[in-house]
Amino acid sequence: MGPYILKRLLLMIPVLLGITIISFGVMKLAPGDPVSVVTDLNPNMNKEAIERIRAYYGLDQPAYVQYAKWLKNMLMLDFGRSFAPDSRPVIDKIMERIPVTLLINILSMILILAVAIPLGVMSAVKQNSVFDKGTTVFVFVGFAIPTFWLALLLMILFGVKLEWLPISGLRSLTYAELSVPEKVLDLGKHLVLPVFVSSFGGLAGMSRYMRSNMLEVIRQDYITTARAKGLDERTVIFKHALRNALLPVITLLGLSVPGLIGGSVIFETIFAIPGMGQLFYQSVMSRDYPTVMGILVIGAVLTLVGNLLADVMYSVADPRIRAAG
Amino acid sequence: MTSTHGPIITILLVFLILTGCDQHKATTKDPSPKTETVTSIAETESEPAYGDMIIRGTIGDASVLLPVLANDASSFDITGLIFNGLVKYDKDIQLVGDLAEKWEIADDKLTIRFFLRKDVKWQDGQPFTTKDVEYTYKTYVNPKTPTAYATDFLKVKEFRVLDPYTFEVTYTEPYAPALTSWGQGMLPSHLLEGTEITESPLKRAPVGTGPYRFREWKTQEKIVVDSNHDYFEGRPYINRVLTRVIPDPATMFLELKAGRLDQMGLSPLQYTRQTNTKWFNENFRKYKYLAFGYTYLGYNLLDWKFKDKKVRQALTTAIDRDGIVKGVLLGLGEVAYTPYKPDTYWYNPNVKKWPYDPEKAKQMLAEAGWTDTDGDGILDKDGKPFKFTIITNQGNQLRERAATIIQRDLRRVGIRVKIRPIEWAAFLKNFIDRRNFEACLLGWGIGIDPSQIDIWNSKKTGERELNFITYVNPEVDTLLDQGAATYDREKRKEYYDRFQEIIAEDQPYTFLFVSYSLPIISARFHGIKPAPLGIGYNFDRWYVPKHLQKYHIAP
């Protein structure tokens, strides 16, 4: 196992390098640059001033020089400073967004798993029943509903009409004066709608996946054997079938590691949540190269690590793979 | 950034910077204020009282809180509360002193001597002196400062400090917009001198001389400022200003409805249809006044189709601009005829207006050689059909809708128009910068100073310059130069009046509309007095009577 992991880790280096080159290249291919977004059509800007600002950001140099500079800093884990007018270190901008993004994504992932796995299992066990069909309709409605529309309806109901929940944002205005349990409660109240809305759309994928895995497993010989042994249906389904059907979920979880720091622009915009989605969107729109690259690199590293973790976990969980490997 | 992009924002900045918070008495009243208060309850006069907090909604977060580095409206909205310039505009758009007590312009019109107020202190207690002004000036002209506002200061030939409260600036040529440029926020030299301004902590925790002092900034969440008790114009009544970032206008409106916001800007739809309930009438007041900006359809004058001014006049005549104001702005705006704001001193109402008349437009086009010779319903000339594409920036619904109405109107006179919305950065780089367009639908902010050299001068047609439609008229060049070199207001207006007549005759743009700003504010705030400059100019004199105060904020 040790040498295998080491080999995989070493392999990541060229892959990562390739990813950064492609990302940098694609970003440079997009028309416009961070300076023109700020200075074009600005009556206060003359050509001289524009050149000054371009030079300040090093944009007057050829792309490969810019890349080399960026890479050199990156090797020392220096993400550089943002090209946005705030000129803040990229790492600060990312770090202040990550906690809330992680929190919401982890909570909704837990909610998705907690609801989708039982739904999928029950659908498979009662294949083609009314429950199965009802579930299918329900999860696909969730998948199809536009997030922003559902979010607005829920805000009107729970925020304006019933006044049970806050409408947007993360904290009440009085947050600073609250005691710790009150703070948790306050944060929790603010998270109810965002977490619900963001998981609702994800139910379909996970429950369908679980259902087909389960159907696959139920047809296997060893399930027939288990039934033949006279085990009761509960034991057959939850002990023998479910554990095997859950295996591919590990891969899915591994693949969703990078998604944990990714956010959705629409959803964060609607709920006024200062997450990664908005940061990335704004950075791309203003051609803030260092921030875009920073987020892409972190995303790439997490993807690679997530894949490795999934593979390792898989072999830990599944003796068949261990034997073969 | 969403709907309003660069162009509108930029000139607005100057305006925002200059609308600090103040209570100067009106000096003159030349333009009739077109502002009107829409309210159903009479304002009961009551005693001003200190206290309470105002919660305002904004769709975009500030980017940096030092006026020299900022270039977006959200940042200037906050720095306007924290910083002062040497001069500012009062409610009637007259230039008055802010940190400067007075100024003298020498007879040769080249040197301005400023006398600073002696009672001004930075929010950390240090006195404000010419040292700060000198530092601010040097920062703006420093090549290492990435600022958008160096141009006016680079025209200064010499900067001389005479004593801690007096200084002189000398220009190479008389330059009337110079005075306005001293309205840029002054920076504290004792905190910034010798530091790299782009890395200064003051970017996110500024110290100014203004009515409010910085308290807290949570990125993309909120910015909080508290009243400055030592403000040289007196302590502001409202103890705290909390600006919440809510990127989605629909969500923001729900927050307003739930009573968690005190102020936001309404869309025309929200203004006319969604805020007329009893609850809104009791708890809020709506205001409307002309915004400092206009929307236009610009023709690329390098394109053969638009070279003839007769064609451009016909196009304007064919476009139902009242229909656009009604359809796009739901009537909450005015048709624009010149590049000046209709209720200001510089506006010339006596220009050719080219009223909507499709039949006349057809006739004018025929005179210019455009007729439908092959009977396909499209005008043609020299065998080429009259078809063109209007480009505009993606995400600005008002502009896209206006373009659609124009498309319909021009179809009626036999011209086929395509509309193409393009993402902002690509729009600038691939289309505007390269002159790669036929017509574009955009907006300009209207500066308070009437100088518009950058947009109309024939020398400003280079790459990345603002006369991207390549408008060339030597008389306009002369008039604009004369206007910029003249300090005398009346004399100056003559130049700009003539300039507007020529622009209206030439129609390089079809001027479309000036929209209204539509703020809605909780009825508990008193002392709001709409004026030509809007409502924000006396923000530090707004108050909540003691019995109406909602939030208890320790002073």
Image (cartoon, rainbow, N blue to C red):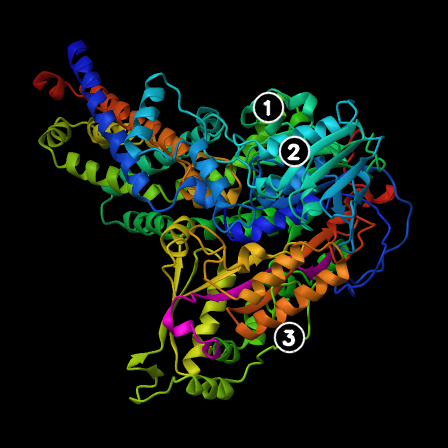
Segment colored magenta:
B285-311
Q: Is the C-beta separation of discs 3 and 1 under 8 Å?
A: no
Amino acid type, label 1 = Pro
Instruction: List the residue tagged with mark 1.
Output: B201
Q: Is the C-beta separation of discs 2 and 1 under 8 Å?
A: no
Of residue B475 and residue B521, the one placed in the foreground of this image is: B475
Q: Nearer the viewer, mark 3 or mark 1?
A: 3
* Farthest-out residue, top: A2
Amino acid type, label 3 = Val
Amino acid type, label 2 = Tyr
Instruction: List the residue tagged with mark 2.
Output: B137
Residue A182 is covered by the magenta coloring: no
Residue A98 seen from this side:
yes
Q: Residue at x 69, y 63 (%)?
A: B276
Check residue B351 in the rendering and tell me which mark sits there, or answer none: 3
In the image, residue B178 lies at what x, y percent? 68, 46
Kindly indicate the quadrant of the structure image that contains residue A207.
Answer: top left
- Check disc 1 and report its element: helix, strand or loop: helix
Up/down of B65 relative to B442, above or below: above
In the image, residue B368 lies at what x, y percent? 42, 83
